[in-house]
Image: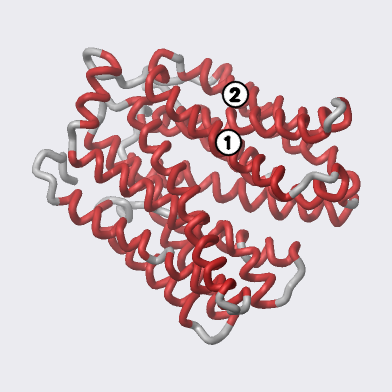
Amino acid sequence: MRSYRATLIASFLGYVTQAISVNLLPLLFVTFQREFAVSLEEIALLVTVSFLVQMAVDLIATRFGDKLSYRVGSVSAQASAVLGLISLSVLPYMLPSPYVGVMIATVLMAIGGGLVEVLVSPIVDALPDGNKPGIMSLLHSFFSWGFLAVVVLSTVYFGAFGVENWRYLPLLWAIPPFVTGLMFCIVPLPEPKTEEGGNKTLLRRLFSSPAFWLMLLMMLCAGSAEQAACQWASLFAETGLGVPKAMGDLIGPCSFALLMGIARIYYAGGKRAGNMYRSLTICGIGCVCGYLIIVLSPWSLLSLAGFGVCGFSVGLMWPGVLSLGAKAFPTGGTAMFSLLALSGDVGCSIGPGLVGVVSNAFQRADIDTFTALKWGIGIAAILPGILAIAVRALQKQPALNKE
């Protein structure tokens, strides 16, 4: 039997590439403001463009992904990330407008991250492994470890060499995707799972299934629940504990990512991911409890612990729904994973946006920033609650292959 151990390692590193592509740029926003006079509106545009490009990659992969070989797509993803990171280091100092250089780098990194998201999961799902939910959970844990590495090692770099030497940092972070791209050139890759009749037949079958619509809703809630807490954790730590931004990054998002990664490792072991319906229901309820701790606790440190509860609870949501989709639609291939990723990405935008809108409304009512932020985050508790309800509804679908 052919060994796919090296393929798994390359896939794990692929999710590290996605973490680098998504999480490095925000660490440099303040530096761009100071060095290139980039406005807050221009920074917001960078975030929006990155999100839209990843959405576009998801949509294109839905229609044409199965026509692109796993090898070409995976190598292209890593190459795009490498080019984006090199461009971030070089182009702002070469072009007349530094902001244009940053924008080009943003687009290239978003393409790379988007391709990783829609290709690596179906590759791993197609491998001959008996514990599909477990290996999918383990795969997605590497995004968490990559996230941690980016924040911690970049903070160490800034402390050692100074923020003024930031331009060499993207070159260092280009090394992992470069190595991963070389691995994808040579590792054995499985054949894509395809539906008889092609993508049109598959998409028609997916969209005619109530179970698939429930999965799309669950992915939207999973992305929303994850990012609603993660994106605001740093500001929460800064305003609630009065710590500097660097410490806020370490206490907030890093603790969230650490516990999310631990949860994914935990569910990857043994039979823990066996009953995915029950596990996802518990995760949804646990995440609601985490949000309520953030809002209702009178002590800042206990509120911060609520972020940890959320991080652990959301750990299984994204890979868990993907596992259910792969089991229910075994020939779904890249198209199915792309649609689910698209819904999750929409949720990643909705969650933090909802928190921001509600927090601003409380601030306009002359409520202090910390309290306003607590209530903004508290509103997001409805998202994992909806996911838990959707899981129970999905379990009752008669046409679904139950575990």
Return the residue nearer the eye: 365 or 388: 365
Q: Residue at x 60, y 24 (%)?
A: 183
**Residue 93: image x %, image y %?**
88, 31
Q: Secondary structure at mark 2?
A: helix
State whether residue 171 appears in this view. no
Residue visible at 83% across and 34% down? 98
Viewer-proximal residue among 25 and 20: 25
> Would residue 34 be seen by someone viewing this image from the given angle?
yes
Figure check: 228 above or below 175:
below
Task: Kindly indicate whether the residue at mark 1 contacts the one at mark 2 (C-beta within 8 angstroms).
Answer: yes
Residue at the spot x=88%, y=54% of the render?
160
| Residue 38: image tag | none
Residues at marks 2 and 1, CA–CA distance in whole angstroms? 10 Å
Q: Quadrant of the N terminus?
A: top left
Q: Which mark is residue 183?
A: 2
Q: In the rendered view, would you say 79 is above or below 268? A: above
The residue drawn where x is 27% and y is 51% is 276
Task: Identify the image quadrant of residue 201.
Answer: top left
The residue positioned farthest toward the left in the image shown: 398
**Up-down: is 10 above or below 299?**
above
Pick the residue in front: 128 or 224: 224
Q: What SS does tag 1 mark?
A: helix
Q: Could you classify mark 2 by the number of other residues whose Cα lies within 10 Å: few (under 14), some (14-19), or many (20 or more)?
A: some
Placement of 217 over or under 58, stated as above or below: below
Q: Position of residue 270 (x, y in %)?
A: 34, 52
**Residue 370 x/y as whole percent:** 61, 75
Report the amino acid beneath label 2: Met
Q: Which mark is residue 13?
A: 1
Question: Which amino acid lies under the numbered mark 1 shown in the image of this protein?
Answer: Leu
- Residue 42 lies in what quarter of the image? top right
